[in-house]
Image (tube, rainbow, N blue to C red):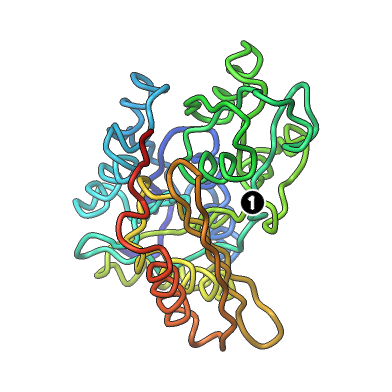
Amino acid sequence: MTQPNAKSPLKIGTRGSPLALAQAFETRRRLMEAHGLSEDAFEIVIIKTTGDDRAMIAADRPLKEVGGKGLFTKEIEEALLAGRIDIAVHSMKDMPVAQPDGLVLDCYLPREDVCDAFVSREHASIADLPEGALVGSSSLRRRAQLANRRPDLRLVQFRGNVQTRLKKLEEGVAVATFLAMAGLNRLGMAWVARTAIAPEDMLPAVAQGAIGIERRQDNAVAGNLLDAIHHRPTAERLDAERAFLAALDGSCETPIAGLAVHAGDGLWLRGEILRPDGSEAIAGERRCAVSDGAEAGRDLARDLLEQAGEGFFDWRHG
């Protein structure tokens, strides 16, 4: 393709949720500003994924039971490979650690707030929840972290977009839930959060708050356009976090948290793995040069796995 214009727009693929669209619009805005292009040089292409359909059918089931988070990217990546779209915009915490052959993920937008948001109509924080309170979440990480810190609470499956989860709170399905502060900020809904949970209290998901833009490896024009909006500091942090996740063979079926931040001239990486029932958590950290982030991530993963031993991620019964 040539430089995008009204007759030959750059096609931006995305899911159709309000948050996914907000991320696609942010990508379009940054490309417009970077290259002096008008809005009609871009076309937003909404792609319904298998995961979207199954989420509507089985919103009360864990994501792992309906196929994992790859269900939310499969059709978008197929459209990218087929040339029906030119780039794809993703929430990085939902992305598998490996891309299909022919696709690359080498553009990240500046990272938003990484914290989890505590959301409740009645209570101000996790500490304020009464014993036995019903909390909704489908995130295995959040459920395990909460069970580890507050084993007295009761947990219920709670999945869907921001609007769906807020409606469930209003209907009394649970008294509290969690969302990502990044998503609330991008939707202009930061007021929904009663509090942002500090990473020291609940380490976030790997790559939480980051937007990644995927393209075909042979699409040099798209690559050049994206180079202008790529945020290197975010890439440096995600290199460490995603290497940590990959070495743990992380998926939606394993409770894993990780966060890298710049500290002086280097990186500070923290990681945590938990038993799915929250009965045990193992945490560690590494400090390293920015260029060594990926190796630090792999090294931290090896250390935590050695401490955990075989069967750590299996569910305990009885």
Residue 92 at x, y percent in the picture: 46, 55
* Residue closer to the observer: 240 or 110: 240
Q: Is residue 7 visible?
A: no
Quadrant position of the C terminus in the picture = top left
* Residue occupying image coordinates x 37% and y 46%: 252
Q: Is residue 122 visible?
A: yes
Q: Vertically, is 157 above or below 184?
A: above
Three-letter code, disc 1: Met
* Residue closer to the observer: 315 or 185: 315
Callout 1 secondary element: loop
Q: Vertically, is 166 above or below 232?
A: above
Q: Report which residue position mark 1 lands on.
A: 202
Say how many tags the image has: 1
Quadrant position of the N terminus in the picture = bottom left
Residue 283 at x, y percent in the picture: 55, 64
Q: Is residue 59 left or right of residue 282?
A: left
Quadrant of residue 150 within the rendered picture: top right
Q: Crowdedness of circle 1 by 10 Å Cα count: few (<14), some, many (20+)?
A: some
